[in-house]
Image: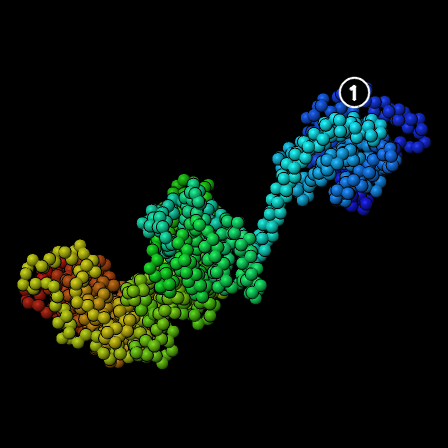
Amino acid sequence: MRNRTCMKQGCQDPPGFINLSSRYDDAVPDSDPEGAQARTDETSHQVNPNQTHILNPSIHVELVDNVSPDLWSAAYREAVESLGKDIDIAILKGRNVAELFRQLGEINDEATQESAFLKGVRFLESIQVPLGKFKMALDLATPLASLDPAVSTVFGMVRGVTAVAITLSTADEDFGKQIAAMLEQIAYIDDCDTLGQKVDKKDIHKALVLVYKKLLEFYSAAYEILSRRGANVIVRLILENGHLPEIVQDFLRQADTLRKLVQKATLEIVEDIKTMLYDQEIGRWLGSSAMRQQSQYHAYLQDLRAAEACEFLVRYRNFINWYSASNSQHLALLGEMGSGKTVAMGFLVDELRRRSENQIPQDKVCFYYCQNGGPDQAVQILSCLILSLLEQLPGLKKRFYGWYKQAQASGNFEPATDTKKLREFLQRLLEAIDRQVFFVIDGLDECDRTSRGVILKCLGTLSQKISRLKVLLSFRPHDEILGQAEGMPQLQLGCAFRRDSVIVRKAVETHLSCLPKDVEALVIEKVSQLAKGNAIWTKMVIELIQTRGIMAIGPMRLFLDEVPVPTQLSALYTMLLSRCTSNEPENERLARKALAILAIARRPLSILELSWAVAMGTAPPEVTTVAALSDWVDRQRLISLIHPFIARLNFGDLKKRQVRLIHQSVRAFVIEHWADHLQTQTTPASTDRATLHRRTESLEGLLLEICINYLQLDEIGTTAIFPEEQVAMEALPRDVDLFNDDDLQPNDALSCSWEDLEHGMARYDPADRGFGEFFVYASCHWMHHFGAVTNSSLPSLASIESLCQAGSTRLDNWVQQNCRPDCAIQPRFEFDSSVYDPLSITSLYGSEAMLRGMLEKSDFGKDKFLPNPLIGAATQILQWGDFPRLKMLLESKHGHQLHNLDFFRLITKRWSAFATQFKDWDQVFDHVDYVLDISVREQWAGKLLSLAAGAGCMPIVRRLVMRAQQNTELKEQLMRGLSCDELRQNALRAAVQGGDLDLIPFGK
C-alpha cells in the first residue's frame, strides 16, 4: 500500500521499484514495427519448452548486479546466486516474461470463456481471502495490463508470482487454499524492514533468502506449466504433477518462519518505541538533565582523584561492618570543608560497583552529589535516586509509569514535585527489587534544613521497611546534622600528611608535569606541609601555580612562602558564607565578626568563648554588665552561620577550646577581604605585604577592643575573683602526702608541659564567679593584641587607664587570671598587680606608638597611676629586658623623673640580678650620659660612682671615669662627693684622677 500510494502521488520510485503504470510494450516506439516483430519472434523462440537453455554467465551477472542495495534486493540476489543451475536464469528475462503474461491473459475457461486470472480472483474472494491487502503487489482492476515483465528485480518477481498464483488457484480447492495462504504470507515480505527501520537482522535476512528461493522455484515450475496452452491442460498438469503444491508447502513453512522473525523484530521495535516513550515521559517528570549532570560530575571526580588517597576508607572497621551486614545499614563519612569528601565518595561509588560486577545478582548503586544548595533539594535527590534505579532496572519503567499516571488521575497533577509521593514511589520500587541497593548521597549538609530533614526521614523509613538497602552519607560535622544522624557509624576524613602528599603528587603530575625535578620536589614538599588535610586548597594552589607559569626555584620558593588565596577558593568561601547567612545582613555581620575573631585569636576558643566574644563585639553600648551581655549570647545561631569554616566540634563540651578555622587559607581570606574594619566584600582585595600587615593589625585592634570592653564590664571591676582565704585553701594539693618527701620531684618540671604539671590541681571557673565565659581569654591575651596594634587601631588612653588603674579590683582580677591561663588555683608565675599601673603595663606590653602616646598625653598625677609611674615602668622594663623602651621614658616630657640617683640604683640592682639573662646592657648604661650635668649640678655624681663600684658595675664606673677625663666639673664632683669608707674613697679618687680603672676596688 505504501508503494502504491507513492506511485499515485507521482513520487520518485524507491530502490528496486518498477513503475507499474507503464507497460513493457511502451519501451519500444510504435513507429518501429520491425523491432517489435523481432522482439516477438525472440520471445516466441524463448518460450519453447522443448528448447535446451544454456546458462549465460553474462546474463547471470546482469541479473544480480543490477539489483538495488536494499535489504530485499540483497536477499533476492543471494537467493538467485544460491540456486545456481537449479533455475534457468533465461526465464527471468523480460521478453520471456512478457510473452508468458500475454499467454496468461489468453488462458480462458473453455466452458465460460472467462479469464482464468479473474476466475482465480473470484475463487479466492469466495473463500474469504482479503485480496485488498495484495494491491501492494498487483492492481486487481487491470492486473495483467499493469504487469512489468522485468522479473529480474525483487518487486517484479513478487508481482509476477502473485499474478501467477492467483491464476493457478482454481486448479483445485485444496491447492487454491494453499495459494490463498501463500498470498497471505507474501505480504510479510514488505514488513521485513520492521516498521520502516533499516536494521541489521541476520536472522530475517536468512529467512527472506529462503522465502525468495521458494518463490523463484514456484515461478520456475509455474513458468513451465503456463507455457502449455489451455486452462484444462494447466489444471491437469498441476494435479498430475505434485511438484508445485510441494513448493507451495515449502514456501509456507519458510514464510511462516519469516513471519515469526518479523513479528519478533517488530515487537522488539515496538517495545523500544514504548521504552523511548517511557524514557521521554519519565525523564521529563524526574529531570533527566539533572541525572546527566550527576553522571558528568562523577566522571570529573574520577579524573581528579588519587585512588591511593581514598583506599584507606574501605579498611575502616565501620565500613567493613556496614558493607557485610545482612540488614539495612547507614554509614556516614565526615570531614571538614575541602577535606576531599566528595572525591572520596566518588571513589566509594566506584568501589561498590566494582565489587558487584562478579556477583549474582548484582548490587545496584545509586548516587547523588549535592553540589549547590537551594530549595527543593529533597525533590532533586529523590528524583535522581528513582531515575537511577529505573535506568539500571528498565523493567520497572512501565510499572512506574503506571503509578505516576494513576497519581495524576487521582488529582496530583505534578507528583514529581511532591516529596511525599516521590518517597512512596521510591519505596514501591525498592519493594519490587529482590537485590541489594546502595544509596550514596554526598554533601547532605549542602541542603537546606527542610530538605535535609525530609531526606533523613525518608531514608530512615526505607531502612525500616527495606531489608537490603544500604545508605552512605557524607557531610560536614556540625551539631544539627550530627543530632539528626545520631547513632550512625562514621568514617573520618582527617588531616594526614601521607594522604596530603599523595594528593599533592597526583595534582603535580596532572598540572605541573613540566617542572624541573628540584622545583617539583619543592612544590610537593611545601604544599604537602601546608595542606593540613585540605584537598580543595591543594588543588587550587597547584592550578594557580600552573596559571602563573612559575618554573624557576626562586620565584617558586617565594610563592610558597606566602601563598595567596586562589581566586576560585575566595569565590567558594564567599558563596558558602552567603549560603550559610541566607544573604541576610545581620547574619553576615555576625559571621564575619566571628571569623575575624578566629582569624586573629591567639589560641582555639571554646564555643562559649567565641559566642560571648561576638556578643561583646555586637552588643549596644548600654550593655555594661556581664548579666546583661549574657542575654546577647546566641551560640547555636552563631555556629550555624560559620560551621563550614571551622573544624569539627564536640558539642558535648561547650567549654573545650576547640573552635578554630579549618585551614590557613580561611584566615588569609578573612585578612585579604574583610580585615579593614570588616569591610564589605566589594572592596578589592590586595595581597602586597604592607596592605596585609595593615589588615592584620586591623583584626588585632578588633579583638583588642572586644577584650578591653569585656574586662571593663561592671562585675569585673567590683567583685574580686578570689577571696584570700579561698585561695589559701584551694592552693593546697589534693592528692599529695605533704609529709612524704618522695612526692617532691622538682626536676620533673623540666620535661613536663604546664598542662601535665597542673593535672590534678584544684581549679575554678570564672563564670561561676559571675565573670562570664570570655574573661579567661580577655585577661590572658588582651596584652598580646595590645602590643600588635600601632597607629590606626590603637585603643583610647582612657580605656587603658581604666583597665589598668593602679590598685583597682579590675586590675587585680585580670592580673590574677593572667597568671592562671588554665584556671588552676596555683599560679604559673608571679604577677603582683600592686606594682603595676597603666604606664608600666603599656611599657611592657603596648606598642611603641601606644607608649609614646601615653607619655605625651596622659596625666600621671591622677590616681590611676602609681606615685612615681616612670620609676615603676622602668623597674618592669629592667626586669623583663625590653631595654630600648628606657630611652623612650628618658626622652619623654616626664623623663626628668628618672634623672636621679634612685633610677641608677635601680639599674645596678637589676643588672646584678639579670646581668647574664639579658644582653645589650650597654644601651642601659649609656643613659649615664643623659644625667652627667644634672648629677654634677645636684651633687650626686660621686654617690653614683660609689654605688656602681660597690655593686661591681664596671660599665657605669668606666663611663664615669672616662667622661671625667674630659669634664673638669664632673671630675671635681667625683673626687669630693664619694659616699663610702675612707679607704675606698682614696682608691676611687686615685682612679678618677689618673683615669686608671685598675685602681678601682669593686664590691662592698
Judge left or right: residue 458 versus residue 67. left
Q: Which residue is mark 1?
A: 53
Q: Residue at x 11, y 57 (%)?
A: 745
Label 1, residues with CA under 10 Å away: few <14, some 14-19, many ≥20:
few
In the rendered view, tell whether residue 242 sits above or below residue 345: above
**Relative depth, front residue between 682 and 927:** 682
In the rendered view, tell whether residue 472 sits above or below residue 673: above
Please state the horizontal and vertical placement of residue 995, each as a whole percent of the image: 15, 59
| Quarter the N terminus occupies | top right
Please state the horizontal and vertical placement of residue 674, each as a whole percent of the image: 43, 65
**Relative depth, front residue between 457 and 676:** 457
Please state the horizontal and vertical placement of residue 991, each as a whole percent of the image: 12, 61
| Quarter the C terminus occupies | bottom left
Q: Residue at x 41, y 55 (%)?
A: 466
Residue 588 visible (yes or no): yes
Please state the horizontal and vertical placement of residue 593, each as a whole percent of the image: 39, 68
Q: Quadrant of residue 644?
A: bottom left
The kind of residue tagged 1 is His
